[in-house]
Image (spheres, grey):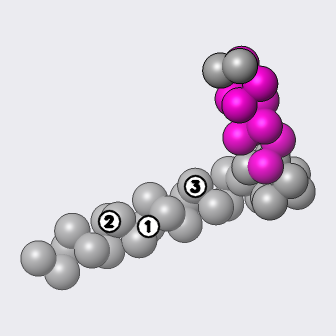
Amino acid sequence: MKKLLSLLAIAALLAGCNTIAGMGKDISNAGDSIENAAKKK
C-alpha cells in the first residue's frame, strides 16, 4: 500500500510539472523563495 501511495504521489508531481525540466524550475523557484525569506529576517 505504501508503494502505491508513493507512486501516486510521484505521478501527481510529474503531471503537475509536465516535464523533468519543469519540475527543476519549480524546485528552483521554491529554493529562491526560501532564500529570499531568509534574507528578509
x and y, in percent, of residue 35 in the image: 32, 65
Q: Residue at x 71, y 19 (%)?
A: 1
Say if mark 1 contacts mark 2, CB within 8 Å. yes
View extreme (front): residue:
1
Type of residue at label 3?
A: Ile
Residue 21 visible somewhere in the drawing: no
Q: Which residue is mark 1?
A: 32
Mark on residue 35? 2
Residue 33, relative to residue 15: is it above or below?
A: below
**Rendered-image quadrant of the C terminus:** bottom left
View extreme (bottom): residue:
40
Residue 13 visible somewhere in the drawing: yes
Mark 1 element type: helix
Q: Residue at x 20, y 73 (%)?
A: 39
Q: Nearer the viewer, residue 2 or 19?
A: 2
Q: CA distance from mark 3 to mark 1?
A: 9 Å
Say if mark 3 contacts mark 2, CB within 8 Å. no
Q: Which residues are the magenta region?
A: 3-12
